[in-house]
């Protein structure tokens, strides 16, 4: 598909918006050390719903409501060889809307069907939908995002059992955010680069993320080259060693190797405090009509990832649910009257109806023990 100038501009704007959103969401949620999270998956869901917001969301999402929605549609409609994305919505039967939402809504299914949707749209990486629906559920909205790039060649293992990278992008880069960092990115033919960035252990996680963004930005601008040793001096550092060895035969002047761990991660996140969630949730809630006085919205994400000798794969399902809020008990004054039959008393059985109306059938005198 040929990309027009306008589409190219929107694509660049969307990429910048997601990068900026990731930084602001990470700060708002305190997820700098989360094992795995997809800010893009959350952004995609919010951007798809952006036009339902009653206020402008550009400060939160990095684009105006209409541009965010257009960017989300473009991402969903443009095929990528390694990325799969989906957005869906389900409405409880019998619930009406004050106004339309910018997502096609199906009839709310059972929990098993939502689980099946998550599994299908994450290529089996996530088998359980991150929200449990119940009788109070009115509306469910969700995005799914999955990536699975393979390395151009499987990585070997070093003597310590770590993955050994001898090709691809490797560098030591001086950054403003975190000082010198080491960077490794295995080669892949799947149009996805997976950068590993390590800083001095004294550097805060937030600053390491800023350094990562700086490295990628400078790499994209051709300011950082492969095998760059962009730090003062040429000696050992916090995550690298430098030595000279003697060899025979033809050999490059430098040989770079990265020793990387194999890893798996799984996380569940409450996204209620992420930028833009409150504004868009308010717009969604205002559209829902049901036999309820109040509604509440929750937003969560389930994410998984793994990194091994064959490649990298990760998936996230981000879900937003609007449900009838539990009634809040109201204080009121109540007149209480207690009757105590704790002394001898009479009991009479009186007939009602027809010819027997009013006839006392039985009398008893009851003497409580």
Image: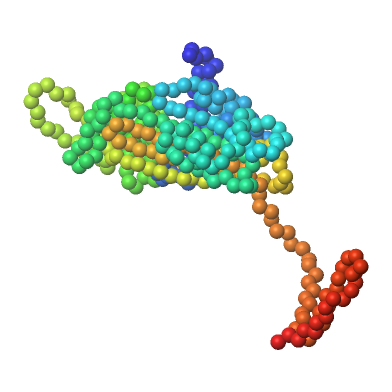
Residue occupying the point 52% across, 46% down: 270
Q: Find residue 241 and report its image quarter.
A: top left
| Total count of labels | 0
Q: Find residue 177 and report its image quarter.
A: top left
Give the residue furthest to the front: 355
Residue occupying the point 52% across, 25% down: 76
Regarding residue 279, the answer to whether it shows in the image is no
* The C terminus lies in quadrant: bottom right
- In the rendered image, residue 350, in percent from the top left (x then y), is placed at 85, 73
Residue occupying the point 24% across, 39% down: 162
State left or right for residue 36 relative to residue 278.
left
Camera-side residue: 118 or 263? Answer: 118
State left or right for residue 313 relative to residue 130.
left
Residue occupying the point 73% across, 59% down: 330
- In the rendered image, residue 110, in percent from the top left (x then y), is placed at 56, 41
Q: Find residue 70 and report its image quarter.
A: top right
Camera-side residue: 94 or 162? Answer: 94
Q: Is residue 44 above or below residue 221?
A: below
State left or right for residue 319 relative to residue 97.
left
Give the residue furthest to the left: 248
- In the rendered image, residue 273, in percent from the top left (x then y), is placed at 55, 45
Camera-side residue: 273 or 80? Answer: 80
Regarding residue 250, the answer to whether it shows in the image is yes
Rendered image coloring scheme: rainbow
- In the rendered image, residue 319, in percent from the top left (x then y), is placed at 54, 39
């Amino acid at each position: 598909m040929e990309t027009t100038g306008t589409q190219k501009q929107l694509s660049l704007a969307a990429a910048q918006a997601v990068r900026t959103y990731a930084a602001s969401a990470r700060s708002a949620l305190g997820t700098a050390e989360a094992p795995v999270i997809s800010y893009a998956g959350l952004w995609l869901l919010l951007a798809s719903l952006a036009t339902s917001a009653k206020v402008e969301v550009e400060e939160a999402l990095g684009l105006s409501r209409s541009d965010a929605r257009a960017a989300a549609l473009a991402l969903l409609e443009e095929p990528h060889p390694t990325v799969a994305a989906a957005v869906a919505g389900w409405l409880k039967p019998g619930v009406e809307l004050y106004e339309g939402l910018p997502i096609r809504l199906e009839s709310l299914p059972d929990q098993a069907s939502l689980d099946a949707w998550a599994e299908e749209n994450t290529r089996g990486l996530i088998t359980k939908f991150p929200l449990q629906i119940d009788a109070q559920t009115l509306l469910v909205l969700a995005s799914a995002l999955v990536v699975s790039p393979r390395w151009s060649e499987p990585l070997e293992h070093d003597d310590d059992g770590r993955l050994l990278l001898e090709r691809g992008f490797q560098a030591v880069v001086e950054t403003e955010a975190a000082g010198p960092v080491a960077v490794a990115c295995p080669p892949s033919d799947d149009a996805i680069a997976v950068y590993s960035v390590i800083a001095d252990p004294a550097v805060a996680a937030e600053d390491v993320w800023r350094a990562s963004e700086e490295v990628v930005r400078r790499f994209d601008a051709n300011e950082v080259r492969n095998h760059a040793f962009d730090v003062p001096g040429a000696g050992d550092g916090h995550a690298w060693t430098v030595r000279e060895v003697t060899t025979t035969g033809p050999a490059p002047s430098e040989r770079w190797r990265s020793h990387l761990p194999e890893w798996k991660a799984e996380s569940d996140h409450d996204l209620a405090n992420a930028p833009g969630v409150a504004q868009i949730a308010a717009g969604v809630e205002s559209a829902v009509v049901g036999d309820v006085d109040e509604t509440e919205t929750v937003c969560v994400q389930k994410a998984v990832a793994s990194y091994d000798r064959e490649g990298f794969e990760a998936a996230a399902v981000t879900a937003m649910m609007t449900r009838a809020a539990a009634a809040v008990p109201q204080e009121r004054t109540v007149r209480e009257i207690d009757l105590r039959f704790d002394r001898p008393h009479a009991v009479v059985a009186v007939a009602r109806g027809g010819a027997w109306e009013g006839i006392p059938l039985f009398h008893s005198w009851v003497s409580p023990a």
